[in-house]
Amino acid sequence: MSLSRRDLVKSPFALAGASVIGMAATEVRAQARAAAPQDIIELWPDAPEGALHPGMTEVIEQTSTSPGYSSRRTNGISRPYMISLPAAQPNGSAMLIIPGGSFQWNYFEHEGYKVADILNRAGISCFVLIYRLAQDGWKEPAKVGPADAQRAMRVIRAQATRFHLDPARVGVLGFSAGGFLTTTLATRHSAAFYSPVDAADQFSARPFLAAPIYPVQCVDPTYAYGGVAPSLFGGPPTPAQIREWSPDLNVTSAAAPTFLVHAEDDDAVPVANSVRLRDAMVAAKITVETHLFAHGGHGFGVGGQPGSPDGLWLPLFLNFARQEKLFA
């Protein structure tokens, strides 16, 4: 079912009506109310250029077949935006949350809203990024996600007063393909992925800290997730593309402190993605904490799979964030 961008995110009833599989309308409506955002923040003053399919419509799908559990995703993003989910008792810190979805979808619930709900309880205000997707068709598909992530960090800082935030204490947390954007922000936050458009672009895009969760980050076919090169480059990567777009090959002393989570039995994104980034961070003397779980597979997020480490990694992240002084 196709919905407008604003109807998709702003209206619980519109959310509830979107491609519901095996769930009563009342159940979906209740979940949609619980996840209803407080605000929608446009990333760009005008629609970004470079779409190969102008006029595409944002679409939402329900992927869950389990009664009482919702796992929605969206694509067809021509005008990226953030969903503001402020903490009830904010401590001045914030996290940009970047869902995954194989560069084809934004899984905005188990890798978005549900994560924000837990971080909100710790006083951390959250912003879920609905970003342009490489597989939706763009002239420079590798750049669109990183550009949206950079812009999101800058817009949050530009509006820090509005959201009662300390602009210095804004981190980023992302999953899978969203982990690619997260690791790119951690390592290439100063790269020129787009030309400045307004005063918000005077702010830094460097995150206070970064938390890539089962991240796609290496584009070297020896270690990479199989879908990364076709999505970003349309085919096998060249040596120059491997060098430019693998965050582990771009770690400098300016990289952000990093918290990594991966499952050893991940059969989609090899655990080597996290291990290689960890090794590069250690070599550059960047603070890094790594948690490798024996079981969990891929895409567990929060509430994603029975028996996954989703109940374990978020408290570990909060401890890391507190140690790094994201919040007291």
Image (spheres, grey):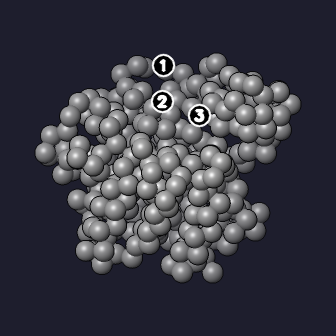
119 relative position to 56: left or right: right
Q: Disc 1 or disc 3, which is closer to the eye?
A: 3
Q: Residue at x 19, y 44 (%)?
A: 241
As drawn, 240 above or below 19: below
Toward the viewer: 197 or 116? Answer: 116
Q: Residues within 10 Å of mark 1 (few under 14, many from 20)?
A: few
Seen in the picture, residue 143 relative to 189 is either above or below; the reply is: above
Crowding near the residue tagged with mark 2, few <14, some 14–19, many ≥20 C-alpha atoms within 10 Å: many
Tell me which amino acid carries mark 3. Answer: Arg
Q: Are marks 2 and 1 in contact (CB under 8 Å)?
A: yes
Between discs 2 and 1, the one toward the N terminus? 1
Between 301 and 133, which is closer to the camera in this rendering? 301
- Number of the label disc, if any, that sits on residue 73: 3
What distance separates the C-alpha of mark 1 from that of mark 3? Answer: 20 Å
Q: In the figure, is residue 241 to the left or right of 62?
A: left
Residue occupied by mark 1: 55
Amino acid at circle 1: Gly
Which secondary structure lies at badge 3? strand
Marker disc for residue 78: 2
State the residue in front, 264 or 224: 264
Q: Position of residue 204 (x, y in %)?
A: 40, 63
- The location of residue 301, given as percent across then percent down, is 58, 50
Discs 2/3, front: 3
